[in-house]
């Protein structure tokens, strides 16, 4: 995702290192070597187009290429000459020619600028240019200059590593990661910033470098740089000014995209300084980087305040995603589509974020991702679809998704053509939650068959107790399943009862259930699939029995609204599950019991299904009110009713306001957004049916 490269021209500093100094570990240096014009190499047979035949020039290879020819500017750079200078600075025996040190630094800057220009202007053949520079033997002298503590050497190595996994791997093998780790804390700010710049390339473009970075102990040091006061000092870096703090945060963010790194990052305390940057940085790019990192690390914690964005940050994130879809820079950076979508997929779990993302045009920009072609396209599509799936749980967002031209058809196309089972499953989840009749019908008709524990196929009329759970508590749920089977219940659990698509088999499992045990936990609430499952069970009016799997956990948000005032059966202590099964079995009664399956089969129908809706409307929870709105053809107002926490008691109070009909009409119009007279009249009539 890195893309911040040096501007044309470099500032020169007054201080220059002693060319006779021995090779030493990186020191704290605030100055840079003077970047004077490189020495002319006019000895016969050693010009820029002469063959490399003897001495230090033996390893030199011509790299004349179309890219180099196209980068000629007013300050034309003769790349071949500068590579020859570097090859002479470090002999084949790894001996430095210190008299060539100033020229070697000038050559380093010139090569960096040439490659940066090619990258920033998206010239064809950039990777060939990088490869040819590397094949000329440039990495060895550049690494030697880095060991001497020159920031420009790290920056040159960074631009050669840009989107080039092979170069990143070579530098890791040369010990550059350990070099940085050993000297990072003791170096000057501009040198630290240059080191972090290179580390960002390693983290962004070579997953194989992550393990060496973890082993080198870099994460705690980077977290410290995010916290330190000096981290606020600006250093010119690439096409914009960067601070050490934001440069270190960029490394952490790229590491955070890899789930294997999460434990180390969280243990090192990375989340809080990243949250501080997200909240307080004046630099939009830094705020975005921090927000994406926090989203990756905190995960799908719907109610976590650290995931709550502000409107400006939402707008900035969507702007850079839009720019990334077009292949352009934003805030001096080439952003990566899939990484931004990964952050949005987590951030869109939060209900307030859903509203802001939709209001800021996020659905339309995610549609660009779904309909477009991008680097790592399969992953980009999967995370974009995951974000859309989250948004679809919000009624307003759902409407925008459905009404965005071509978006639903594009989701269907990905479902039909993707070779990734994960991507197909996310596409199904999004379509299912959108609830369009043709998609729901198609998924139901193509659903996976249910398989019995003995391997035989379950008969279609068999009703069972479905165990809806998140995989983190699977072992405890399996014990509950075993106890229910001992008590004579037919059970369904996705670990051994599924063949084919997860979502399709889930739908059939819900439809064929007599009762659904919702195994409540924090991770259950955060799971898209679990929410889809629980809400579908509610829509099908199944008997829902909450089973608490996490001690002292109190569900809020959508899960709290779904559960309402139902009695919870506490199964959080696995040792006590057998002794607590009696009360659970009493609650289930004959629902799903095998010896009760064939009683009065002829009259079994919708009226025989145990409903979750309460007999009295004034005891409804928020979700039951929402279902009522859908039944009376007022589904477009579900979002406003949820915002006003309209449960059955509140609905009853709304009905009593009808004693002043003018006031009731005004309330429905101003508070609930029901501007159409016919809709208000229908609402009032249906309220009278409920409570009249």
Image: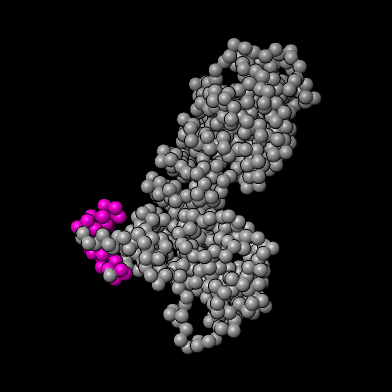
Residue 100 in the image, given as x and y percentages of width and height: 69, 16
- Dominant secondary structure of the magenta stretch? helix
**Residue 228 in magenta?**
no
**Residue range corresponding to the magenta coloring:** 662-691
Residue 262 in the image, given as x and y percentages of width and height: 63, 45
Q: Quadrant of residue 218?
A: top right
Name which residue lies at 55% across and 68% down: 517
Q: Is residue 344 left or right of residue 648?
A: right
**Residue 686 in magenta?**
yes
Name which residue lies at 57% across and 65% down: 569
Q: Quadrant of residue 458?
A: bottom right
Front position in the image: 26 or 325: 26
Name which residue lies at 63% across and 32% down: 222
Residue 426 visible from this viewpoint: no
Indicate whether 151 appears above or below 627. Answer: above
Residue 492 in the image, given as x and y percentages of width and height: 59, 72
Q: Quadrant of residue 665?
A: bottom left
Residue 327 in the image, given as x and y percentages of width and height: 48, 41
Query: Which residue is outermost to the right?
Result: 93
Residue 17 visible from this viewpoint: yes
Indicate whether 610 appears above or below 29. Answer: below
Indicate whether 524 appears above or below 178. Answer: below
Q: The C terminus appears in which quarter of the rendering?
A: bottom left
């Amino acid at each position: 995702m890195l893309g911040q490269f040096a501007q044309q021209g470099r500032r020169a500093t007054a201080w220059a290192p002693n060319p006779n100094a021995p090779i030493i570990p990186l020191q704290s240096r605030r100055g840079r070597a003077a970047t004077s014009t490189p020495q002319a190499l006019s000895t016969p047979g050693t010009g820029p187009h002469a063959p490399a035949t003897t001495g230090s020039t033996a390893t030199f290879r011509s790299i004349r290429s179309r890219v180099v020819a196209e980068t000629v500017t007013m300050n034309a750079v003769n790349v071949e000459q500068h590579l020859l200078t570097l090859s002479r600075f470090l002999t084949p025996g790894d001996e430095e020619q210190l008299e060539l040190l100033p020229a070697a630094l000038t050559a380093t800057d010139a090569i960096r600028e040439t490659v940066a220009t090619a990258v920033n202007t998206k010239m064809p053949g950039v990777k060939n240019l990088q490869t040819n520079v590397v094949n000329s033997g440039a990495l060895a002298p550049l690494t030697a200059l880095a060991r001497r503590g020159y920031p420009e050497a790290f920056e040159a190595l960074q631009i050669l590593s840009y989107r080039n996994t092979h170069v990143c791997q070579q530098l890791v093998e040369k010990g550059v990661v350990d070099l940085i780790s050993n000297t990072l804390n003791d170096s000057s700010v501009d040198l630290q910033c240059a080191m972090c710049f290179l580390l960002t390339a390693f983290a962004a473009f070579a997953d194989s470098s992550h393990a060496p970075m973890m082993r080198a102990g870099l994460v705690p040091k980077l977290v410290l740089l995010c916290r330190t006061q000096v981290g606020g000092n600006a250093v010119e870096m690439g096409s914009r000014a960067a601070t050490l703090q934001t440069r270190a945060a960029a490394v952490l963010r790229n590491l955070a995209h890899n789930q294997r790194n999460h434990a180390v990052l969280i243990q090192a305390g990375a989340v809080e300084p990243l949250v501080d940057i997200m909240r307080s940085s004046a630099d939009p790019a830094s705020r975005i980087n921090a927000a994406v990192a926090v989203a990756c690390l905190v995960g799908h914690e719907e109610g976590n305040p650290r995931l709550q964005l502000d409107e400006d940050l939402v707008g900035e994130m969507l702007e850079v995603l839009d720019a990334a879809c077009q292949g352009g820079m934003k805030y001096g950076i080439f952003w990566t589509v899939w990484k931004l979508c990964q952050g949005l997929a987590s951030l869109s779990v939060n209900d307030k974020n859903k509203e802001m993302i939709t209001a800021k045009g996020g659905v339309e920009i995610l549609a660009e991702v779904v309909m477009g072609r991008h680097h790592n396209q399969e992953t980009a599509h999967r995370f974009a679809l995951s974000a859309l799936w989250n948004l679809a749980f919000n009624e307003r967002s759902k409407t925008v998704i459905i009404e965005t031209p071509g978006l639903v058809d594009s989701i269907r196309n990905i479902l039909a053509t993707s070779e990734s089972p994960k991507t197909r499953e996310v596409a199904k989840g999004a379509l299912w939650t959108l609830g369009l009749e043709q998609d729901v019908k198609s998924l139901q008709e193509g659903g996976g068959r249910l398989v019995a524990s003995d391997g035989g196929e379950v008969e279609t009329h068999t009703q069972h107790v479905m165990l809806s759970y998140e995989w983190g508590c699977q072992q405890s749920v399996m014990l509950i399943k075993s106890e229910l089977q001992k008590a004579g219940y037919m059970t369904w659990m996705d670990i051994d009862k599924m063949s084919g698509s997860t979502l399709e088999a889930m739908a059939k499992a819900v439809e064929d259930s007599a009762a659904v045990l919702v195994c409540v936990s924090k991770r259950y609430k955060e799971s898209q699939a679990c929410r889809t499952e629980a809400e579908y069970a509610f829509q099908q009016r199944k008997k829902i029995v909450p089973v608490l799997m996490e001690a002292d956990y109190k569900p809020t948000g959508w899960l709290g609204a779904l559960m309402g005032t139902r009695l919870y059966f506490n199964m959080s202590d696995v040792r006590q599950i057998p002794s607590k099964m009696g009360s659970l079995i009493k609650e289930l009664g004959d629902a799903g019991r095998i010896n009760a399956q064939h009683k009065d089969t002829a009259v079994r129908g919708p009226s025989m299904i145990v409903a979750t809706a309460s007999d009295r409307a004034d005891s409804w929870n928020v979700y039951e009110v929402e279902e009522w709105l859908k039944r009376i053809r007022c589904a477009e107002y579900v979002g406003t009713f949820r915002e006003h926490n309209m449960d059955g008691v509140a609905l009853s109070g709304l009905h009593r306001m009808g004693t002043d009909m003018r006031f009731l009409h005004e309330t429905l119009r101003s508070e609930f957004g029901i501007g159409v007279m016919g809709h208000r009249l229908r609402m009032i009539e249906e309220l009278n049916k409920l409570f009249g």
